[in-house]
Amino acid sequence: MNCQVCRERLSEYLDGALDAAKIVEVEAHLAACVDCRETSHAIREGIQAVADLPAIEPPTGFTRRVMNRIRKENQKPTLWHALFYPIRIKIPLHATALLLIAGLAVYLYQIDQPLQRMVDREEPALEKKERLLEPSENRPKFRNDITTKNLRRESSLQEKTKESNEAIDLRKRAVSPPASDIAESDKKDLRAQSELTEKVVSFSDVMLTLLFDGPADKEEQFLQKIADLARGLGGEPIQQELKASATGRASFRIPRKHYGRFKEEIAVLMRIESETDISSSRRLNPPPSPLSEAEKSLPSIITVMIEIKEAP
Amino acid sequence: MSHHLINQDENDEREWVQKVQKGEIDAFEVLVQRYEKQIFNLLYRWLGDYDEAAEGAQEVFLAAYRSIRMFRGEARFSTWLYRIAINHAKNRRRRIAARRERTVSLERAYPEEGEAPSADLPDGGLDPEQTTERKEMQVHVHHSLNRLKPEEALLILLHDLQGLPYEEMAQVLNLPLGTVKSRLHRARMALKKKLTPYYTATREGI
């Protein structure tokens, strides 16, 4: 055994964690090598010095203070708390707002469509008018009008294409190969879910609201950690949106069976303020398209939206 | 100082955790009492400041209570609690560092090592028979730990102060067992480097 190997094993040797054969080797080397013997001695002194540090008593009344804070936290039923407490799954204000906004968006989109059709129908009529008015000096004005209208229509079309491109991007990302240690079955589930997602992109199953108490610039690192966590559990991140001062949102797809673990790991990193089962509200307000059989049964992959708020 | 619990308490502990999960707030008191000293001492040695440790330890237990429903008993409760404590302490370290940076840039006259981690150390923990020399030694060890890289100090504290076995350290830190062993060794070598001059000086009576 040379000095380097011996030194690498010294810590374990001193902890009594080596097997008998290795102990013999290390001891033989120590008997022969003064340098390693000194190193071993110095490490041992260090270990002892740390072990000898006196145990310091926590401040008096530590437990009482902790328990007081916990009890206080538990007995402040606000109006909202009182209102929603009987419901097993609490629906916080922001989740309700989110659903309302989604509903409003669908509504606006629908009332927009008849308008579009009206514009389509309008055009030939205008052209007729144009022909009728051909000799008049009003004609260029009409042309302008039509150009503006067409432009407007084009830009709205472009916007729509952009939107659908984004949706395709999202789907592409969703289908992209997930982390290495994902189980085969999870992969299949994921693919099935990805197809599903094409129909219901904007709906999450669960929303977790987290309170972030670290510095704002560490939030991205934190989201990165959650993304790694999701990948490690056979899921994947879908989208992420960081805002100013430690707030942000991100969505992840997680195998349902690993969701508990996912939550537990997050709880180590950050305080989970609330957990909302959005899928049940989704059932209350189903999206306009009829649900397929696969969607009705519990999907094995769930989508988790994470919302981060700054801790007060 | 090895507060580490042995297996026989584990079942009992699981019961207390379940009680808390069912909403019995008082059951949490048992868990706080059981771990307050460990968590507080880890934070005190790692952060190097008594008040920060006291405040930090409180936050750790609050955080644990708030998310105890997420704890599913796959690991030991202590492992989970340590993970919360370390994560919390990391954030706190960053804040302390940022604050210190501001103070230093404002008052450059202060030397870098002016933190004096043991200046605020209450006498309660010290044995009255301890010689001044021994006290000095402890202060020196405390300082040396604080001058190591935070990750190195943490490994040493978890193993040599708190008595966590390699396996539990691996779980707490989410690292492979081999990595824990090699990093602990490297950390001890770093501490040795800081302590050796002091030992040599003491032995030579300087």
Image (cartoon, coloured by chain):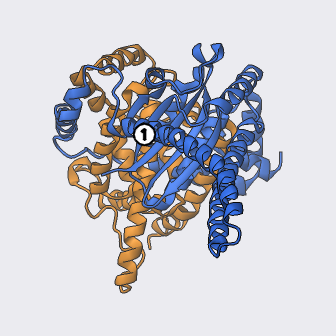
- The chain carrying label 1 is A
Which amino acid is tagged 1? Leu
**Res A38 seen here:** no
Could you say which quadrant of the image residue A140 lies in? bottom right
Give the residue at x 58% y 63%: B193
Q: Classify B133 as above or below A271.
A: below
Q: What is the display colour for chain A?
A: blue
Q: Nearer the viewer, residue A28 or A173?
A: A173
Q: Nearer the viewer, residue B183 or A281?
A: A281
Q: What is the display colour for chain B?
A: orange
Give the residue at x 66% y 34%: A232
Relative to A59, A4 lies left or right: right
What secondary structure is marked by label 1? helix
Quadrant of the snapshot with the N terminus of chain A = top right
Residue A170 at x, y percent in the picture: 68, 43
Q: Which residue is mark 1?
A: A98
**Res A43 seen here:** yes
